[in-house]
Amino acid sequence: MRLLPVLAMIIAPAAAMAEGVKIEDAMVPLAPPGMMAHAAYRKLTNAGDATCQLIGVKAEGYKTAHLHQSANAGGVATISVVDQIEIAPGQSVAFEHGGLHIMLMHPVDVAKESDIVNLTLLFADGEALSTPAKVMHLHHDES
Amino acid sequence: MRWITALLIWLLAWPALTQVQGVMLDEPLDLPPFAFTNTDLDEGRTLIMFGFLSCPDICPFTLGNLEAIVTETGMRVRPDNVPNVVVVSVGPERDAAFVSEYAKFFHPDFTSFTGTRDQIYALIEATDSFYRLMKPDHTGYYEVQHYSSVSVIAPDGTLRAKLQPPFDPAQIAEFLARLQISYRKELAQ
């Protein structure tokens, strides 16, 4: 089973599969100077038969990483930590601006454009799923 | 045939037009002088945004949009009427060392600064804005809740309007261009 994600990444480099979970469009916007934290985004689809529970994330090159949610309530931008995200079979969850995102904190080195940040998603059943996220310039029209 | 085409265009454009992008103040609001910046708010038009450097999601996204808004506005107004974008960090202790580099990352002409708590508070009050520093975690990192609208300051140093998310570049540029026309009308009176 351990070979499956690796095999899937060789066949389809843009999408990783494990236990039926597919990751697409993983990216990290190039971070401005002076930051202690920035974000990563991607889309998750549960193509399997069982509900999966995402409970955490690890990022190579960062001391910590969290699942986070931004919201704009009454004109005030707020952020909160998300403990668990359930994805039902066939359902997709988008991590995008102004909503869910992976918060990358305390970088060991400053990420440069085209660098790869390896993200590992942790699930409640003990499964871990890795995906490379490319560091790229954020353009407004890609939102 | 022509009116049908016009009607179709109008109907297609309608949902976009109804979305609120900015609110114009009925009366211009005087702002107190701010001594803590090299950026003179009395020079040209200024868009002020509050944020903090380690803001992972909202601030970089808003600044990306402001970059697009400035480009779009540049196609509609004279070069000297293109607004200056100013970012005010509400976390001076943490951000002071890097703050001057921050906004430049998004656009070479953008400026960012911070000040003392009192100075920041004065500007927050004057623009009817808000921020709150959250409790630090074990690493000392703290989150900031902050007002997400952008304040529009006219060349006479008065607060004129607020821009609101989702910051559609073309629509905000239209709003800013209209705001300038009404400002000029006011000057001509």
Image (tube, rainbow, N blue to C red):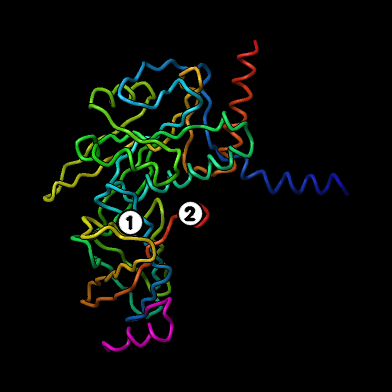
Q: Nearer the viewer, mark 2 or mark 1?
A: 2
Picture quadrant of residue B170 = top right
- Return the residue at label 1: A39
Q: Amino acid at mark 1?
A: Ala
Res. A41 visible in picture: no
The answer to whether B76 is drawn above or below residue B33 in the figure is: below
Query: Which residue is pictured at 24% across the width and 23% down the height?
Result: B118
Residue range of the region highlighted in magenta in the rendering: A1-16
Residue B42: x, y in percent? 45, 20
Q: Amino acid at mark 2?
A: His
Pick the residue in front: B61 or B72.
B72
Query: Which residue is pictured at 41% across the width and 66% down the height?
Result: A43
Q: Say few, some or many: other residues with alpha carbon within 10 Å of mark 2 (under 14 / 14 to 19 / 20 or more).
A: some
Residue A96 sits inside the magenta stretch: no
Picture quadrant of residue B90 = top left
- Image position of B42 (left or right of B14): left
Q: CA distance from mark 2 to mark 1?
A: 15 Å
Q: Say few, some or many: other residues with alpha carbon within 10 Å of mark 1 (under 14 / 14 to 19 / 20 or more).
A: many
Query: Which residue is pictured at 36% across the width and 16% down the height?
Result: B33
- Return the residue at label 2: A139
Residue B77: x, y in percent? 62, 32
Residue B95: x, y in percent? 24, 39
Whichever of callouts 2 and 1 sits on the residue coming sooner in the sequence is: 1
The answer to whether A128 is drawn above or below residue B41 in the figure is: below
Query: Which residue is pictured at 55% across the width and 33% down the height?
Result: B82
